[in-house]
Amino acid sequence: STFLRMYYTDYTNRLHCLIPTRNMIRYPFLTLFRFFRVAMLVGILLCSWSVQAQFGGTIVTKIEYRNVPDAMQGYVGILPDHNVVKVKGEKKVMIQSLSGGTQRIYTDAIQKNMDIALELMGQRIHLVMTQEEVTQNEEEKIKPTITYLKGKKKIAKVTCKRALCVFQPADGVADSTEVWYAPKIRVKGQDLFPGLQGYPMAYFMDVSGMRAWFEVKSVSEEFLLDSDFEVPEGFTKMTMDEFRRSMGGM
């Protein structure tokens, strides 16, 4: 939807994520970092969901990239084809693997913080988002008008219902997107579909000029350790600005 494109573009502008250029072909190391940030942006959007305490466990979502522009064809393989979300109470971690590395995005709905652990080409970096950055993200949400539609189907063995979310930006044209959601997996704060009465199980998102389809493939309720939601030792802590400067201001 236009809303999701606008939301993604806002993060893109902040982190200076670039699309393929001739320099990317000449400097593959920089190329990997740039596309790693595309995956990071997707993760930040998805990991902003705050799942209610009654659900604890693991959700695996498959990602398919469609309508890929010619300039992006050679880089789709770098991006993640799935993500794993682990939830315990108000804490959550999203794990994504891609060519050359792994990222883990940790969020705490009570503390209102976000930490990103990157393992990329031998480097281990712990990015810290300030409360101001997280709060700004929350304040910039656009709440959609949601129409609940008829129809049910099973996704990952979970009964899902259908909804139409219409976004009306203050200075833009209204746009809509259809979402399949699971009423039994409740959420109470999410950046993509605020107010939706359940966990988004299947939907489209525009990512850096590509159309991406997200669909949950498995849901497992299980006990998770507190250590699953802590950044491991051995990571170099940086702010987003410090990380950007270390990459030459990309």
Image (cartoon, rainbow, N blue to C red):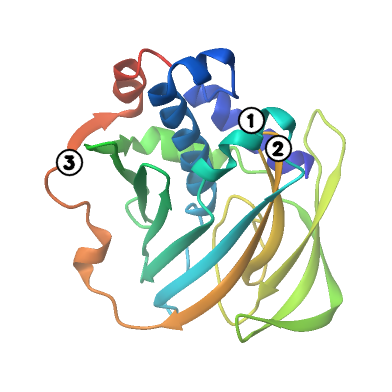
Task: Depth check: give the residue in front, 218 or 133.
Answer: 218
Q: Quadrant of the N terminus?
A: top right
Closer mark to the observer between disc 3 and disc 2 = 3
Is the residue marked by circle 1 packed among few (<14), some (14-19), or many (20+) residues within 10 Å?
some
Kind of residue at badge 3: Phe
Give me the residue at 80% from left, 28% from top.
171
Q: Quadrant of the C terminus?
A: top left
Give me the residue at 59% from left, 42% from top.
76
Q: Is 105 placed left or right of 42 in the picture?
A: left
On the question of residue 44 being in view, the answer is yes
Q: Does the residue at mark 2 contact the one at mark 1 (Cβ under 8 Å)?
A: yes
Residue annotated with mark 2:
5
Give the Cα separation between the discs numbered 3 and 2.
Answer: 32 Å
Kind of residue at badge 2: Arg
Q: Which image quarter: residue 222?
A: bottom left
Is the residue marked by circle 3 packed among few (<14), some (14-19), or many (20+) residues within 10 Å?
some
Please provide percent x and percent y for residue 244: 36, 21
Task: Depth check: give the residue in front, 76 or 238.
Answer: 76
Give me the residue at 43% from left, 31% from top.
32
Give me the residue at 41% from left, 52% from top.
97
Residue annotated with mark 1:
9
Task: Depth check: give the residue in front, 38 or 79.
Answer: 79
Q: Element at badge 3? A: loop
Please provide percent x and percent y for residue 72: 65, 32
Q: Element at badge 1? A: helix
Give the Cα separation between the discs numbered 2 and 1.
Answer: 6 Å
Q: Is residue 6 above or below residue 13?
A: below
Q: Is residue 188 above or below residue 30?
A: below
Residue annotated with mark 3:
235
Please provide percent x and percent y for residue 56: 39, 77
Is the residue marked by circle 2 packed among few (<14), some (14-19), or many (20+) residues within 10 Å?
some
